[in-house]
Image (spheres, grey):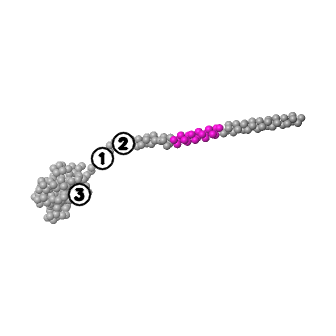
Amino acid sequence: MGTRGKGRRADSSRARTRSRRASGGRAGSRRGAHGGPWLAAAAGFLALMVIGGFLLLHGAGKPNAAAAIDASGTAAATRASSPTAAPSPTCTPEPADAAFAHTGSKAQPINVRVTVLNGSGTFGQAEAVLSWMQNTAKFLRTSNGGPAPHNQPLTSLVYAPNHVDQARTLVAALGLPVASLHGNGTSTGLRDPMVLTLGADFHGVGKEFTAC
């Protein structure tokens, strides 16, 4: 009886042990079943993060940047190739000098005193005119006044009323248009020079005055 009792207790103990092991296995299986999807999702998220970082670092966005650069370059080229109308020069002809008469006495070139200013916008025009006046036309009492205070569309000759004979000589030599003449000068002294300011209408000695 004692031996059989001991055997039954041993069998009962082994049965409980197997039951606990089976229960533990089922619980582990349940935990594994529930934890598997979460682990897979986490692994997938990490993989996406790694791939996204790799693409970002290795220029996945560069095609868009290149496209933007290409588009801006194309737009710039289009603007550069588009013809832009240059502003046309505008000038208002001065009224004719009613006090000037082409007929009348003329001074000798040696007695013509004039200061030449360059308001044409073309470098060296005053020096070129002065060289011609002194060396060819024998206007020896002339001087180069340098650049005018500002460029102007029309050539002007300012002279005092008592210097009209000098003005006639210079007008005949250069072919100055009537619109260039201004007989309102205040420098009336015998040695006071007239002032000739070359404008954009002057294109060289002997050439027609054209600006508009």
Helix, strand or loop at label 3? It is strand
Judging by the rendered image, the residue that carries numbered circle 1 is: 86
The one of 83 and 177 positioned closer to us in this rendering: 83
The one of 103 and 152 positioned closer to us in this rendering: 152
Q: Marks 3 and 1, how far apart in space? A: 25 Å
Residue under the image location 49 percent in, 43 percent down? 57
Considering only vertical position in the picture, is 26 above or below 170? above
Considering only vertical position in the picture, is 178 above or below 2? below
Judging by the rendered image, the residue that carries numbered circle 3 is: 147
Q: Position of residue 112 (x, y in %)?
A: 13, 59
Residue 77's disc number: 2
Q: Earlier in the sequence, mark 3 or mark 1?
A: 1
Q: Position of residue 43 (x, y in %)?
A: 60, 40
Query: Bounds of the magenta span?
Result: 36-54
Q: Seen in the image, is 106 located left or right of residue 15?
A: left
Residue under the image location 81 percent in, 37 percent down? 13
Q: Residues within 10 Å of mark 1 (few under 14, many from 20)?
A: few
